[in-house]
Image: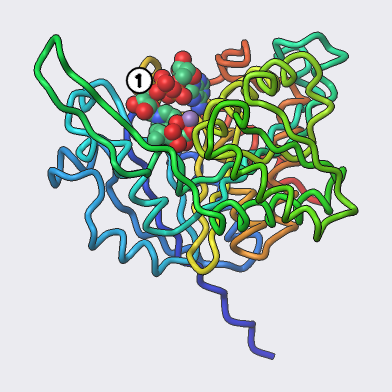
């Protein structure tokens, strides 16, 4: 009998800036290992984004590159940005490349899980009783809100300048992310907390109306509403009350960094950005960390856990996803720690530890 053909998977790699290329190199090693174990050939297409693309091409993401990225099976982005490019016009900053990528792929749902590893209870800022209960996922709307609303701009001369942005959502934008959050809750602890600022913002009043209306189809799921200021406090006070958090773009950005300190480090938090017809986009929650870039000390675990999400949501490899998550947990259990977790392993050594556990029999 002839051997079955190897499956080929096309992955777009966008290393970006700062620690981006460092954690991307680690992620690529993990992909190679996944491929070897699952009879898959990963074909990589690498693209410049962010500051790297500004330096090379004068723009943070070339339209032709976006078109090619769209043709891939999945997209991995490491991080963009840095002080070198902070003074440019808004549409010529590294971050505009990332926002253009998200919009261009129409990945409107950004899933940001935060779950404590029992081995890292000491690394959390919380008292152990609270730390051990952290197991939540943020459904952050990713292609709307104040990030993209028009009009936006700046005018005037020094001393009299003015600047404005617009927070805007349509019913359908709210409904499609609400649906996804309710569906996800059915596979978890069946509780959705919708976070808004409906005591002040009309956009949030619409958000609350639509989420409440959509909830009619999910009566088996509990729905609660919190104002975002209270939600930030409750996350620190009693994180165990949260299962699925459903929120708009800017609030989700802020609350997800807060969650980093609940689980121990921003270097642990993965994300998946999903849409209806486009390849999924997988990116750590953290940024380009200019303060540690080039030092070989970035924590690669957020990247690894993002690749686990890619295996689960885009590649139909749930076993590989679980194997990655187990390898990360086992490495942590064995005491492997990068500097952000109080240890002394560099990116390469941490990567080796995780790959060793990934490759173990069983
Ligand atoms: P950041 O996440 O880059 O860094 C915040 C702190 O966390 C720093 O002290 C950094 O050293 C640490 N940190 C981050 N990732 C780490 C890792 N993997 N291992 C160990 N420590 C890590 O946030 P910032 O400093 O506010 O932003 C720096 C740049 O990154 C900015 O230009 C910002 O716009 C950009 N940014 C990009 C993304 C992205 O590409 N998805 C996300 C956030 C911020
Ligand atoms: C994130 C980042 C981005 C965001 C920036 C870099 C545009 O902070 O992914 O959390 O605000 O969405
Ligand atoms: Mn952020």
| Above or below, comparing residue 84 to residue 71 in the picture | above
Can I make out residue 159 in this image?
yes
In the image: residue 169, left or right of residue 256: left
Is residue 244 or residue 115 the one in the foreground?
244
- Which residue is located at x 70 percent, y 38 percent? 194
Depth order, front residue of 341/208: 208
Which residue is situated farthest in the bottom direction here?
1
- Colour setting: rainbow
Q: Is residue 193 left or right of residue 111?
A: right
Q: Residue at x 68, y 55 (%)?
A: 180
Q: Secondary structure at mark 1?
A: loop
Asked if the beta carbon under badge 1 is closer than 8 A to the nearest atom of ligand 1, the reply is yes
Residue 39 lies in what quarter of the image? bottom right
Q: Quadrant of residue 40?
A: bottom right
Residue 296 visible? The answer is: no
Q: Which residue is mark 1?
A: 290
Q: Measuring 20% from the left and 29% from the top, which residue is drawn there?
A: 154
Say whether residue 251 is left or right of residue 4.
left
């Amino acid at each position: 009998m002839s051997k079955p053909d190897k499956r080929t998977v096309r992955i777009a790699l966008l290393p970006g800036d700062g620690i981006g290329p460092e954690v991307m190199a680690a992620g690529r090693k993990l992909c190679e290992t996944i491929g070897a174990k699952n009879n898959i050939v990963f074909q990589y297409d690498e693209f410049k984004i962010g500051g790297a693309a500004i330096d090379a091409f004068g723009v943070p993401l070339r339209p032709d590159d976006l078109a090619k990225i769209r043709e891939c099976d999945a997209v991995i982005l490491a991080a963009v940005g840095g002080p070198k490019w902070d003074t440019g016009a808004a549409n010529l900053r590294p971050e505009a490349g990332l926002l253009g990528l998200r919009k261009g792929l129409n990945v409107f749902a950004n899933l940001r899980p935060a779950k404590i590893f029992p081995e890292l209870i000491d690394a959390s800022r919380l008292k152990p009783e609270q730390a051990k209960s952290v197991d939540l996922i943020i459904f952050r709307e990713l292609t709307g809100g104040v990030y993209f609303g028009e009009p936006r701009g700046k005018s005037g001369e020094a001393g009299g300048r003015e600047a404005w942005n617009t927070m805007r959502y349509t019913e359908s934008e709210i409904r499609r992310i609400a649906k996804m959050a309710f569906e996800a809750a059915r596979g978890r602890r069946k509780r959705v907390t919708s976070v808004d600022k409906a005591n002040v913002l009309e956009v949030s009043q619409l958000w609350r109306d639509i989420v409440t209306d959509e909830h009619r189809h999910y009566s088996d799921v509990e729905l609660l509403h919190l104002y975002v200021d209270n939600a930030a406090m409750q996350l620190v006070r009693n994180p165990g009350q949260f299962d699925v958090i459903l929120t708009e773009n800017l609030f989700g950005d802020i609350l997800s960094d807060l969650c980093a300190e609940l689980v121990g480090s921003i270097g642990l938090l993965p994300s998946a950005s999903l849409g209806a017809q486009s390849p999924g986009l997988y990116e750590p929650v953290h940024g380009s960390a200019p303060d540690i870039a080039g030092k070989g000390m970035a924590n690669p675990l957020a990247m690894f856990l993002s690749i686990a999400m890619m295996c689960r949501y885009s590649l139909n490899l749930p076993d590989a996803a679980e194997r990655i998550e187990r390898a990360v947990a086992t490495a942590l259990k064995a005491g492997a720690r990068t500097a952000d977790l109080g240890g002394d392993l560099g990116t390469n050594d941490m990567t080796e530890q995780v790959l060793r556990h990934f490759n173990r029999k069983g």
